[in-house]
């Protein structure tokens, strides 16, 4: 996203307050188009379903859907958001480990793609199929070792243990559920344990981006499993959903190649399954910046330079496990110093980032770049109210969310 001018930052914060999230509609559109093109030029039968959890402000969703993306939702609540912005069921992918019976019924009625997470969900879906007196179409989420060192993936049915195949057997035997798709998502947040037996995890490590080889392994295993389904169970897969977790769109080529090559090797063009991708971060991360104002300067014992800014970890929760990329809104002048940027919360852990910055004074504006993903929806009203979010679209400024109070 283009650097906002100092004049614009002052003008916007004067009107909408500081801190302020500024979203670029153009950047979201361009990310989506580039993302889709990288796949479509290799594999035509592709749909991109934007992952709602990453940033689900209705104004953001509308821009993304207008550009042709489907919706990937992970709860009944997000499903409702998709319907509210006008998405037809046939363009909604419904994931997640907790979907109620009523939510599943609604999704079935609408013709949404439902990816099942566990055996209890299969039971609920079987009950619905029995009540409807007809089989229901479902996708099966699988998890498998793709070479990333992490604690067990808690989502879906495990491939190596035979759990995924047991789910398939159950569906083909009772004939209540038609398996039409396979789903996998290589998570971006890797749970680290402190020792081998230490579950639950003690730490979160962001592995992003993962290398294309992880996607290549996932794609090959999906294709092999689809072949097992065809040859041993007579089940023809109609869609392969490779989830999200992708890097910025300018480095997507090797990932698109890694995913599509095994599918193209396996299928004739005419029978190629629909390929669904569920990017979140790759579409919205670079499309938002946060303007924040320096409120105080501090010299800490040991000679550390620090500033207090008006944006804290309550509105930038990703600061807890990633370095935020921050710069001065105005061109920096003078010597750059290693500076810790604290937020305004009365809390020792309210540290936004650390960066080389020029000498600052109260009132100076900073911008935190690439904050469009996982911050706004995970923000909390903690000690301070949540700020406004505005979107710039072809020069016009539109309020996506008002400042909380
Ligand atoms: C099922 C599913 N799909 C897609 C995504 C989006 O991931 P990312 O933002 O890393 O692309 C997530 C994120 O957790 C997810 O759980």
Image (spheres, rainbow, N blue to C red):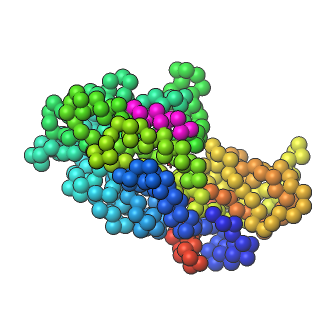
Q: Quadrant of the N terminus?
A: bottom right
Q: Is residue 345 visible?
A: no
Q: Left or right of 37: which side holds 355?
A: right
Q: Left or right of 147: which side holds 352?
A: right
Q: Is residue 133 visible?
A: yes
Q: Nearer the viewer, residue 278 or 252?
A: 252
Q: Is residue 213 magenta?
A: yes
Magenta-drawn stretch, dominant element (helix, strand or loop)? helix
Q: Residue at x 75, y 53 (%)?
A: 341
Q: Quadrant of the C terminus?
A: bottom right
Q: Is residue 182 magenta?
A: no
The location of residue 216, given as percent across then percent down, is 47, 36
Residue numbers of the magenta segment? 211-221
Q: Nearer the viewer, residue 94 or 266?
A: 266
Q: Residue at x 64, y 45 (%)?
A: 322
Tag count: 0
The location of residue 183, given as percent across then percent down, is 36, 41
Q: In this view, which residue lies farthest toward the left?
A: 133
Q: Residue at x 74, y 72 (%)?
A: 6
The location of residue 399, given as percent across then percent down, is 53, 74
The location of residue 330, given as percent across then percent down, is 78, 68
Q: Residue at x 40, y 63 (%)?
A: 68
Asked if residue 109 is positioned above or below residue 183 in the image, the reply reads: below
């Amino acid at each position: 996203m283009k650097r906002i001018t100092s004049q614009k930052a002052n003008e916007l914060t004067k009107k909408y307050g500081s801190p302020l999230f500024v979203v670029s509609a153009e950047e979201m559109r361009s990310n989506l188009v580039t993302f889709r093109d990288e796949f479509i030029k290799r594999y035509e039968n592709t749909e991109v379903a934007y992952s709602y959890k990453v940033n689900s402000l209705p104004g953001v969703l509308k821009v993304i859907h207008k550009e042709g993306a489907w919706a990937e939702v992970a709860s009944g609540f997000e499903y409702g958001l998709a319907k509210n912005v006008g998405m037809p069921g046939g363009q909604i992918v419904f994931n997640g480990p907790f979907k109620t019976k009523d939510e599943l019924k609604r999704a079935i009625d609408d013709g949404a793609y439902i990816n099942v997470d566990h055996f209890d969900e299969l039971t609920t879906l079987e009950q619905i199929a029995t009540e409807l007196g007809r089989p229901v179409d479902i996708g099966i989420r699988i998890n498998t070792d793709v070479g990333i060192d992490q604690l067990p993936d808690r989502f879906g049915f495990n491939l190596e243990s035979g759990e995924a195949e047991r789910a398939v057997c159950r569906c083909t035997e009772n004939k209540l559920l038609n398996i039409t798709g396979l789903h996998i998502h290589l998570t971006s947040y890797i749970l680290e344990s402190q020792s081998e037996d230490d579950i639950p995890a003690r730490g979160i490590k962001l592995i992003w981006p993962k290398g294309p080889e992880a996607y290549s392994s996932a794609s090959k295993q999906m294709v092999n499993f689809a072949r097992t389904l065809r040859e041993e169970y007579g089940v023809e897969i109609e869609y392969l959903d490779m989830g999200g977790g992708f890097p910025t769109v300018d480095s997507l080529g090797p990932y698109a190649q890694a995913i599509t090559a095994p599918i193209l090797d396996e299928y004739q063009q005419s029978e190629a399954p629909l390929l669904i991708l569920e990017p979140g971060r790759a579409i919205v991360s670079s499309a938002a910046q946060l303007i924040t104002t320096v409120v105080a300067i501090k010299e800490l014992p040991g000679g550390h330079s620090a500033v207090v800014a008006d944006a804290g970890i309550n509105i930038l929760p990703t600061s807890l496990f990633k370095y935020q990329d921050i710069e001065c809104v105005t061109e920096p002048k003078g010597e750059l110093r290693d500076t810790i940027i604290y937020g305004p919360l009365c809390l020792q852990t309210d540290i936004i980032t650390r960066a080389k910055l020029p000498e600052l004074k109260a009132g100076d504006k900073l911008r935190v770049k690439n904050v469009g993903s996982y911050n706004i929806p995970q923000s909390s009203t903690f000690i301070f109210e949540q700020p406004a979010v505005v979107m710039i679209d072809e020069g016009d400024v539109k309020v996506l969310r008002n400042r909380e109070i």
